[in-house]
């Protein structure tokens, strides 16, 4: 396998040769074929990538742009190994930045899951990743953020340049191999099985849809959850609601459901006809992702509604041929992490990366610490 060389030429964030235009090759050997990436080839590569997650689908980029703005800055590369790959990415203006460096580039934007390269096959060569890092470092963007899928993190960690800021994350993934009986008996903890049985005895009613019909129900529970989270974190309610509206406006859930009919599923558990808890799952290939959850704690807690919803979603995932059920990020040792681990999900430590021309990460972290101290915020 050819070793990556340093540096690639890319004409500005989100810029580059359009389909059919002359491709550019930098000294690192990464060849930029098109930006935005042609959708037909993107989908072909996605179908050949057994590790691809829903967040790497071109429809997901479309949803992010429709809800949060920006520009499709995806790239189609030919990598040093000869493999063709797509990097999903969104470009947005950077407030106050010079015109020639007026964009931030993200794969994917905050609140829109993970990104990283879409490549055929399960293996990802660190030399190929190094070539992409080199290309992005020479981009015209003020800052570049890259948060790969957890199961592919090792290649990125091995290839990341020393100048990259590395941000630790922990995700939880449940292996569904062996069928649901094996998952239930060997991976669910005893406490999880007892919680599910309690929910079943409570005669909860569960509804689901794959067309967005239940999105308004989910959104109402989500807004109620924001209030509970604000109380737990000692955050002013107005601030919590403002952040939630910015990160997760109601149209975000509706847009995702409309973009992925059949693979975006909303689950709602009700007590005596009143919605108590809801989750949204996304599916792509062998992966099902638990994307969002919300509840009325007073209704859902005593009857363990959330446990039942995950049990049903996991069983459905197995029946549809999925291999992995992703429960997302959480702080190690937290109550949420323990909840996920009770279903047999294994914590996976991984890194997100930032390439920046100014110390934006340090400045942002410092500002957040000051605000949190002032509010007596509790993470």
Image: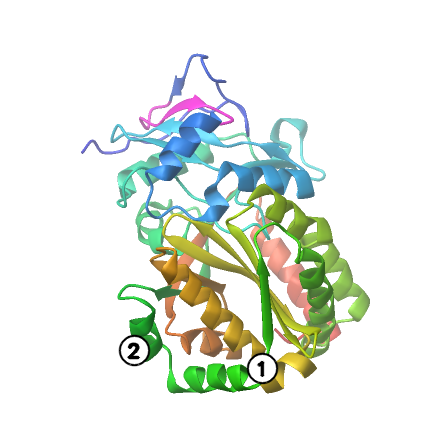
Where 166 falls versus 178 (above or below)?
above
| SS for dot 2 | helix
Q: Is residue 155 left or right of residue 336?
A: left
In primary-sequence order, the first of circles 1 and 2 is: 2
Q: Residue 320: horizontal and vertical position, in percent?
A: 39, 56
- Residue at mark 1: 203
> What secondary structure do most residues of the magenta stretch adopt?
loop
Kindly report which numbered mark, 1 or 2, lies closer to the viewer in this rendering. Answer: 1
| SS for dot 1 | loop
Where 130 falls versus 15 (above or below)?
below
Quadrant location of the N terminus in the rendered image: top left
In space, the residues marked 1 and 2 are separated at their CA atoms by 26 Å
| Residue 297 lies in quadrant | bottom right
Range covered by the magenta-colored residues? 26-37
Residue 34 is covered by the magenta coloring:
yes
Q: Residue at x 43, y 46 (%)?
A: 163
Q: Is residue 345 left or right of residue 59?
A: left
Visible in this render: residue 171?
Answer: no
Q: Is residue 115 left or right of residue 321?
A: right
Visible in this render: residue 40?
Answer: yes
| Residue 126 lies in quadrant | top left
Residue 128 is covered by the magenta coloring:
no
Seen from the viewer's position, the closer of residues 115 and 344 is 344
Q: Residue at x 41, y 60 (%)?
A: 317
- Residue at mark 2: 186
Q: Which mark is residue 85?
A: none
Residue that extends furthest to the right in the rendered view of this protein: 238
- Colour basis: rainbow
């Amino acid at each position: 396998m050819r070793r990556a060389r340093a540096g690639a030429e890319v004409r500005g964030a989100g810029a580059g040769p359009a389909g059919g235009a002359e491709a550019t090759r930098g000294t690192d050997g990464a060849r930029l074929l098109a930006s935005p990436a042609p959708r037909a080839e993107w989908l072909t590569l996605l179908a050949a990538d057994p590790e691809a997650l829903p967040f790497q689908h071109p429809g997901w980029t479309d949803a992010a742009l429709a809800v949060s703005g920006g520009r499709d800055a995806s790239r189609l590369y030919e990598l040093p190994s000869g493999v063709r790959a797509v990097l999903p990415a969104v470009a947005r203006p950077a407030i106050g930045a010079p015109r020639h460096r007026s964009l931030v580039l993200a794969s994917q934007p905050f609140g829109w899951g993970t990104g990283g390269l879409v490549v055929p096959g399960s293996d990802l060569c660190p030399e190929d990743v190094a070539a992409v890092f080199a290309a992005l470092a020479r981009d015209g963007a003020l800052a570049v953020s890259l948060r790969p899928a957890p199961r592919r993190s090792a290649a990125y960690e091995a290839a990341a340049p020393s100048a990259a800021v590395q941000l630790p994350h922990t995700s939880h993934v449940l292996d569904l191999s062996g069928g649901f009986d094996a998952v239930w008996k060997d991976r669910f903890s005893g406490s999880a099985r007892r919680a599910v049985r309690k929910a079943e005895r409570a005669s909860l009613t569960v509804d689901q849809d794959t067309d967005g019909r239940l999105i308004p129900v989910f959104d109402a529970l989500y807004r109620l959850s924001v209030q509970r989270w604000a109380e737990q974190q000692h955050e002013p309610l107005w601030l919590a609601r403002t952040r939630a509206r910015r990160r997760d406006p109601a149209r975000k859930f509706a847009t995702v459901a409309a973009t992925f009919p059949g693979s975006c599923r909303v689950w709602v558990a009700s007590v005596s006809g009143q919605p108590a808890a809801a989750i949204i799952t996304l599916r792509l290939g062998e992966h099902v992702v638990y994307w969002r959850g919300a509840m009325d704690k007073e209704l859902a807690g005593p009857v363990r509604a959330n446990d039942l919803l995950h049990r049903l979603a996991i069983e459905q995932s197995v029946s549809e041929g999925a291999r992995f059920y992703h429960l997302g990020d959480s702080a190690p040792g937290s109550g949420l992490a323990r909840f996920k681990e009770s279903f047999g999900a294994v914590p996976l430590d991984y890194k997100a990366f930032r390439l920046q021309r100014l110390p934006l990460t340090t400045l942002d972290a410092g500002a957040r610490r000051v605000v949190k101290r002032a509010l007596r915020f509790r993470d």
